[in-house]
Image: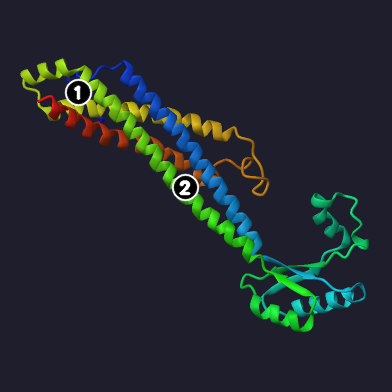
């Protein structure tokens, strides 16, 4: 129905005017916002996934012991870790590395050697991983000053955030679709009311309500499709021009589509057209029924 043009039916709906501009503009604006919502959700999801995977493959052992026992406990912890199944490697951070970790909070001149700073051991897991509960028990028995942090408490919020972002993306898409439907419905109602006399004449010459409704549905669906296509292109160009950055640099610098994700915004125009099709069909039937 949309692809086959009917010149007689097209004359029923004015090609220009307030309702035409409103439909095109609303579809374009909503499509633009939808593209940014998709880019934001995908970029944040990638960032959360990256952080979660990195934390899942690494752990730390923190050793707090008197100065005379620090070296011995560190060596004992390293031996224990090297013998633990699932641990790929373990190494004690140097004084410079520990100072770099504390620098954002205490500044570059922190005298690490003169402060009771715990010794940090960086642990890298294998793909299979290790048993954290068992390792904690062994550390407690052999290295009393050692505390294992397997980053579980850091991973859980990130995974939860990714799940919530996906839910928010669906909610945003639903709100955008509902907004497009509401605006198209208002525009269709206004166009039908403004053409009440034309509709009455068409009925007198034998035009059915189905024929008239199809004319309005076709017009408004095509307008929504054209507007959404323009908004989608503008949104994709805007996202492409956003500054690029690494996955860990921050979420605004990584606000972009990657790989096949560039195909996702192409679904926006047909979805907007489908919403306009349903909204106009419902509005046309309701208004035409009221004009009977």
- Using the image, determine if residue 213 lies above or below residue 129: above
- Using the image, determine if residue 261 lies above or below residue 162: above
**What label does residue 6 carry, if any?**
1
**Residue drawn 65% across the image and 60% down it:** 54
Nearer to me, 47 or 165: 165
**What label does residue 129 carry, if any?**
none
Label 1 close to label 2 by CB (< 8 Å): no
**Residue drawn 38% across the image and 35% down it:** 269
Residue 127 sits in quarter: bottom right
Numbered disc 1: secondary structure: loop
Residue 221 seen by the camera: no
Nearer to me, 161 or 9: 161
Question: Residue 160: percent from the left, percent from the top?
Answer: 53, 57
Q: In front of the other: label 1 or label 2?
A: 2
Q: Quadrant of the N terminus?
A: top left
Question: Residue 209: percent from the left, percent from the top?
Answer: 12, 28
- Using the image, determine if residue 177 lies above or below residue 157: above
Numbered disc 2: secondary structure: helix
- Using the image, determine if residue 69 lies above or below residue 212: below
Q: Quadrant of the C terminus?
A: top left
Q: Mark 2 sits on what residue?
A: 168
Residue 239 sits in quarter: top right
Residue 199 sits in quarter: top left
């Amino acid at each position: 129905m949309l692809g086959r043009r009917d010149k007689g039916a097209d004359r029923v709906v004015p090609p220009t005017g307030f309702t035409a501009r409103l439909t095109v503009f609303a579809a374009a604006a909503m499509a633009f916002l939808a593209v940014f919502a998709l880019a934001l959700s995908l970029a944040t999801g990638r960032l959360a996934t990256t952080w979660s995977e990195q934390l899942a493959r690494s752990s730390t052992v923190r050793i707090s012991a008197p100065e005379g026992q620090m070296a011995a406990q560190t060596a004992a912890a390293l031996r224990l870790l090297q013998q633990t199944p699932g641990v790929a490697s373990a190494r004690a951070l140097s004084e410079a590395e520990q100072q770099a970790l504390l620098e954002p909070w205490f500044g570059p001149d922190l005298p690490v050697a003169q402060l009771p700073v715990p010794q940090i051991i960086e642990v890298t897991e294998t793909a299979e991983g290790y048993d954290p509960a068992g390792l904690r028990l062994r550390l407690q028995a052999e290295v009393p000053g050692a505390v294992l942090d397997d980053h579980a408490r850091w991973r859980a919020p990130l995974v939860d955030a990714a799940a919530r972002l996906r839910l928010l993306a669906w909610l945003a898409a639903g709100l955008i679709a509902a907004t497009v439907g509401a605006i198209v419905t208002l525009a269709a109602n206004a166009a039908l009311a403004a053409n009440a006399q034309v509709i009455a004449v068409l009925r007198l010459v034998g035009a059915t309500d189905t024929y008239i409704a199809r004319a309005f549905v076709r017009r408004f669906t095509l307008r929504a499709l054209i507007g959404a296509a323009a908004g989608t292109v503008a949104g994709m160009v805007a996202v492409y021009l956003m500054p690029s950055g690494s996955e860990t640099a921050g979420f605004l610098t990584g606000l972009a589509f990657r790989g096949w994700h560039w195909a996702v915004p192409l679904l926006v125009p047909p979805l907007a057209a489908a919403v306009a099709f349903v909204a106009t069909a419902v509005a046309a039937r309701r208004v035409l029924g009221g004009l009977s």
